Image (cartoon, rainbow, N blue to C red):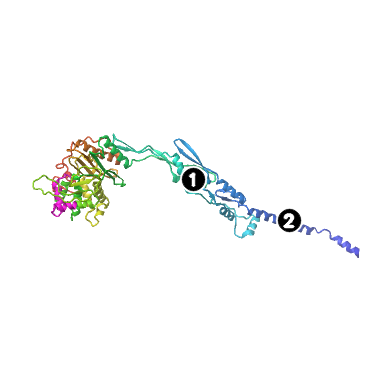
Amino acid sequence: MSSALSNRRRKRGFPVLFTLSFLMLVAATGLLVFELISFSQREEQLPSGITVANLNVSGLSKRDAVAEWESAYAQPLTLYYSDINGDHPIVLSPDQLGWRISSDPMLADALASGETDGGFWQRFMNYLLNNEENLSRDIPLLASYQENVLEEFLKDIAIRYDNPPGKAGYDLQTLTTFPGDPGYALDVESAMLAVDAALRNPTNRIVNLPVENVINNRPQMDTLRTMIIDYLDSQGFIYDGQTTVASIFILDLLTGEEINILGDVTYSAASTIKVPIMIDFYRTLSFEPSQEEAWLLANSLLCSNNSSSNLIMQIIGGNDLFNGIQSVTDTAQYIGAKNTYITAPFFLGVEGQQLGSIAAPTTAPNPNYNTNPDTFNQTTSEDMGTLFNLIYDCAEYGSGLITSYPDGEITQRECSQMLELMSANDLERLLQGGLPIEARVSHKNGWIFDTVGDAGVVYSPNGRDYVISVYLWEEAEFQDYEKLWPLLEEISRATWNYFNPENALIEPRGDLPITAQECEGNYLPPSPELVDLDNINGWKSN
């Protein structure tokens, strides 16, 4: 019995199948654990196909990846300032600018880019089944620095290497101005953008700084001012002397820039006072001027006829000459000519003329210069320039005098007529004598024994219109026309050349008459009915 059992037990043999199954299970478990460990380790690395800040860091550990981009962006930049002397390399370390990279959020974004829906085990299954998504993503650089420090760094470079253009100059022989020699300068604003781009580039750390040529240091009004003063000195006429004084007011009607050389010194206004007379006459008119009134204006402004000017003031005053004189002075003061007035009628030298005067207003001219101005009739170059500016702005833009009289006492057409009328003042000397023969100038002149003055608007072909007002005084019993008039004309020519360099008068005009051209028979319409204030020279073509 026992022998039979013993035999049966021996017949069962070794459990091969069981053992084999067990070993396979162990192997599978081991393989699973291995793959799980491998996948878990890979989860600690950045996914394949991922770039951070333009750097390929896929497969790197978090620590190595961070070290990779922080090292790349810590490399210094080389800036090149190139000029006529060659290339000047300048090294700039990002640390100098307080460069900081926000690595933590960049790393988190990179790791998150490898995650898919389904969590860890879903990703593990995709890994085992080789069904993972092929990624191709870039995580942008997150960095900051102190832009103000960079700006100061670049400005310091500019100070060291920039070559400013030469100062504008002038030529007293031709009375022309010219720009300074060209230079070059760093474009700091563009350079900041270029450096910023290089700071954010891990491989190209070179910046060619933008250097611009500065080729036109255009003459400014100060250049013209200095040239005029130097010219007067060269002619022996001291503009601020004790026996000679020059006052010059020039206004750029395009930019508003001005030159004011002793513009607040008072002079005998002489016939230039007829400009405020004309303004006040237009102000008091309820309708456009009649032919007789237009004739009076033409005689007053073109021929400087004193009796016509007195009659205009009498009309202004309601047939009272002194009321009219008061009105002209009040108007001049009101619209900004604070040192301008007339207090008596023009002396006609005829028997029976009514003489007398009104009280002069309180003025505040420059007390340091005395040109012995007419007690009854005074102005300054600044005041007269201001009046022409007001008329021009009124005619061109509907402002100026219109703004001074917003209730319609002055219209844009009236201002245009004022300038049109004075454009026919063709005496061929003074301001006009310093301009090309075809140039348009609306002006009013005046002179007595020791003073000459002329003021007006010059229309430049290039659109750079300007106001110019010049008064010259020399202590004398009789005016030296051969000295003062050419001086005023050369001041006019210098100013024209400044505003019109492309059409400059290199030499004084040689076609000027010895004295002013006579008005009657030349540029005064021959009869009242031919005076057209909208086309003052129209009669010449009839």
Q: Does the stretch in magenta take in 306?
A: yes
Identified by mark 2, the residue type is Ala
**Residue placed furthest toward the left:** 351
Tell me which residue sits at (32%, 41%) in the image.
222
Q: Where is residue 314 drawn, in percent x and y? A: 14, 52
**Image vertical order of residue 313 relative to residue 517, above or below:** below
CA neighbours of label 2 inside 10 A, class few (<14), some (14 to 19), many (20+):
few
SS for dot 2: helix
Image-quadrant location for residue 24:
bottom right
Q: Which mark is residue 195?
A: 1
Q: Which residue is mark 2?
A: 27
Residue segment shown in magenta: 302-328
Q: Which mark is residue 329?
A: none
Q: Does the stretch in magenta take in 463?
A: no
Q: Is residue 488 visible?
A: no
Q: Is residue 40 visible?
A: yes
Tell me which residue sits at (65%, 53%) in the image.
41
SS for dot 1: helix
421 displayed left or right of 502: left
Identified by mark 1, the residue type is Val
Q: Main secondary structure of the magenta part?
A: helix
CA–CA distance between discs 2 and 1? 59 Å
From the viewer's side, name the closer residue of 509 and 530: 509
